[in-house]
Image (spheres, rainbow, N blue to C red):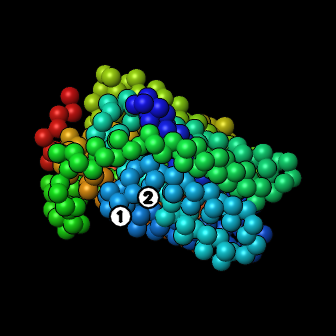
Amino acid sequence: MVQLLLAVIYLSFISLGLPDSLLGSAWPSMYSQFDVPVSYAGIVSMIISAGTIISSLQSDRMTKLLGAGRVTAISVAMTAAALLGFSFANAYWQLCLLAIPYGLGAGSVDAALNNYVALHYKSRHMSWLHCMWGMGATAGPYIMEYALSGGEGWYMGYRYIAIMQTVLTVILIMALPLWKKQSRADNNTADAPSKPLKFVQIIKIRGAKEIMLCFFCYCALETTAILWASSYLNIHGGMSAEAAAGAAAVFFIGITAGRAVSGFVTMKLSDAQMIRLGQAIIAVGIIAVLLSPVQIITIIGLALIGLGCAPIYPSIIHSTPDHFGAENSQAVIGVEMASAYVGSCLMPPLFGLIANHVTIALFPVYLAAALVVMVIMHELLVRKSHVKSK
């Protein structure tokens, strides 16, 4: 029973990743059809992120009300419906409207599943579960490239993913009985506070501000890379839209392979060391993208940025109970998710304005700025907490 539940959680992480890379890989083919500037991808991304912020802040209440299993199934179903709507959209405002359920479907399940794994599994499982997210995110651009290369159009790429999400929803509904015992245990655990902490109470916890800013910068970097790598390769690198969509997928290959390997490396290194290792690899990748005029080196740089991102997200999440205590972990992780989505909401659109009004060539510089602030915030967090970094 326990192993079947873990398999369902793995499946859920795949479903979280499937739609995340679609907009970035499809946008070079979409924006001209909708007759909008290239920067307007940022508005859609911002609406999606706003939905995830709202739902992540409500994750504790929603999970206690419905249970983790129902939250997961409902969230995937909402995402499937939104993706199907994207595939039939013929006006830009329709994309903006559909982005609302798209975003709301992600936040609650993300926070609930991450907290559960952080509390009940070792760090390697967190890495491998996020590797499953990477598998889903990696598949997205290739499915979109298949649709574009076959002349079916970007809308069929969205439709293929919507069908896959629908199948996952059916599986998750069938698996709901697996969650009943675990949901009851989660809602009555002695480690959980009797009442949810208020936002003002959470940010007063020592180190909370630092971890929020750290996560903000990490997700700003990751989502900017996801959304704009394809356009950077197309506009600045001179690649075709179809080739750029496929080449940008190396970011997800890097992050997926990295999380698979990270699961083994965590047996030797602490969460703090894993985060520092990832930050160093990201720096190398950014330098490669910034300085090389050769397309293949730029693509390798994107892969290294993905590889460096691999251990950071799961290691920050997994270290949260150690930094803040199991009794505060769900509340803090909910705020972490919200901070992450604020970064996802604000920073890619901001770069869109820079790309539109200055130059898209500043893409690696923008990533480097986010990395520097992330490093500073993480080091301050480690100093303020009592967690040993080995």
Question: Which residue: 46% across, 53% down?
Answer: 70
Residue placed most toward the observer, 166 or 255:
166
Screen quadrant of the C terminus = top left
Is residue 167 among what the camera can see? Answer: yes
> Regarding mark 2 in the picture, which secondary structure is present there?
helix
Residue 383 left/right relative to 149: left
Q: Amino acid at mark 1?
A: Gln
Q: Earlier in the sequence, mark 1 or mark 2?
A: 1
Horizontal and vertical percent position of residue 218: 40, 51
Query: How much space separates mark 1 and mark 2, taking CA atoms?
Result: 8 Å
Question: Which residue: 48% across, 45% down?
Answer: 176
Horizontal and vertical percent position of residue 294: 66, 40
- Mark 1 Cα-neighbour bin, 10 Å: few <14, some 14–19, many ≥20: some
Horizontal and vertical percent position of residue 61: 32, 62
Question: Which residue: 79% across, 50% down?
Answer: 147
> Regarding mark 1 in the picture, which secondary structure is present there?
loop
Residue 58: mark: 1
Looking at the image, residue 256 lies above or below residue 104: above
Mark 1 and 2 residues: CB-CB less than 8 Å, in contact?
Answer: yes
- The answer to which quarter of the image holds residue 41 is bottom right
Q: Please name the residue that numbered disc 2 is placed on.
A: 107
Question: Which residue: 53% across, 31% down?
Answer: 257
Looking at the image, residue 57 lies above or below residue 36: above
Screen quadrant of the N terminus = top left
Q: Amino acid at mark 2?
A: Gly
Residue 63 left/right relative to 75: left
- The answer to which quarter of the image holds residue 58 is bottom left
Horizontal and vertical percent position of residue 244: 71, 49
- The answer to which quarter of the image holds residue 123 is top left
